[in-house]
Structure formats: C-alpha cells, structure tokens
Amino acid sequence: KECIRRRAEFGKADLHDFLPEMIGMCPGRPIWYRIQRQHTYACSQQNKKYFLRNDANLGRKLLLWPAQEGWLQEVLPAGEGGRFYSTDYLHSGNLAKNASAVKSKFALADMEYDFLSEEDILNIVDRAIPKQVKCWTQTLLRFG
C-alpha cells in the first residue's frame, strides 16, 4: 500500500490518470450509489444487528465497494470506523447505482463516470484488502 500511496502523492498528475485506471483493472472496484429511500441504515460490522441508529440522508451519494458476500463497504478514511450496507438495499430500491467511480475500459458500459477526488483515491488505497493491493501492485509494475 505504501508504494501505491507514495506514487499517488508523488505524481499528482498521475492521480487522476493512472490510479483510477489501475483500480478499474482489478476486481472489487468502487461504485457511486445514491440513497433513494428513507430508513436506509449503515451497520458498523457486516451484520444487521450492528446497525447504526441514524439512517443515512435521502439523496446522499456513497462510494461503496464489495465487502463480504451480501455487503457493501463505504470508502472512508482509514481512521474512521467501518460503515457497511446490506445488498438487500439494492433489491429493495433503497440504494441505487449512480455512477462508476473509475473511468476505465473495464468500467460498466451502462454507467456514467463520476469523479474521484484525491481524498477518495487515497481512502481507497488505505482501505484496500490484500488481494486488491496485489493486483494494483502487479498493474503498477506492468505499466509503470
């Protein structure tokens, strides 16, 4: 992660050109979602019994990526606790895909691209699981 983070911080010009493409080439890329209905609750762990008391704001845009089966994790700064949303919210219409978070030839064809800020990209790097980091590192070594 440190190698990827240094690359992101060193080459600000690369940040929006190279890193989103690299993230998009690997499985588990983040997607922007929008909260469509009230009573959409995040959980502090990947279990519905750990729901957070306040429901998420209607219309709020969330950057989420796959966690364990049946869960999406919000991409937050590493110092913040986890916030997870059940994929049941996708089926119920509480959450709707809004846009792909990475502009990539591997992005979903039926989705618009939405901008990732520098903070978003660094949060993605910080929150990545080892499998993603390995794929990103291999991509970085291959392309540069």
Image (spheres, rainbow, N blue to C red):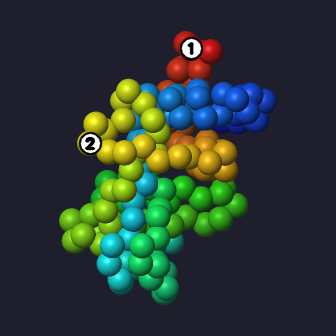
Which of 61 and 90 lies nearest the eye of the viewer?
A: 61
Q: Quadrant of the N terminus?
A: top right
Answer left or right for 96 relative to 73: left
**Along the viewing direction, whichever of 13 and 90 lies nearer the viewer:** 13
Q: Is residue 30 visible?
A: no
**Relative to 115, is 7 above or below?**
above
Q: Residue furthest bottom?
A: 53
* Disc 1: which residue: 143
Which dot, 2 or 1, sits closer to the camera?
Answer: 2
Element at label 1: helix
Question: What amino acid is found at the position of numbered circle 1 in the picture?
Answer: Phe
Q: Can residue 136 be spotted in the picture? A: yes
Dot label at residue 110: 2
Residue drawn at x 61%, y 35% as measured from the top left: 16
Give the class, few, some or many, for how many residues have Cα within 10 Å of label 1's Cα (few <14, many ≥20). few
Q: Is residue 106 above or below residue 65?
A: above
Residue 140 horizontal/vertical position (percent): 59, 20
**For this view, does 50 lie left or right of residue 19?**
left
User: Which of these two is toward me, 134 or 92?
Assistant: 92
Q: Secondary structure at mark 2?
A: loop
Q: Earlier in the sequence, mark 2 or mark 1?
A: 2
Q: Disc 2 vs disc 1: Cβ atoms closer than 8 Å?
A: no
| Residue name at image x 54 percent, y 55 percent | 75
Mark 2: amino acid: Asp
The x and y percentages for residue 11 are 74, 28
Q: Quadrant of residue 58?
A: bottom left
Q: Residues within 10 Å of mark 2 (few under 14, many from 20)?
A: few
Q: Residue at x 48, y 87 (%)?
A: 53
User: Residue 66, image x and y in percent?
Assistant: 39, 51
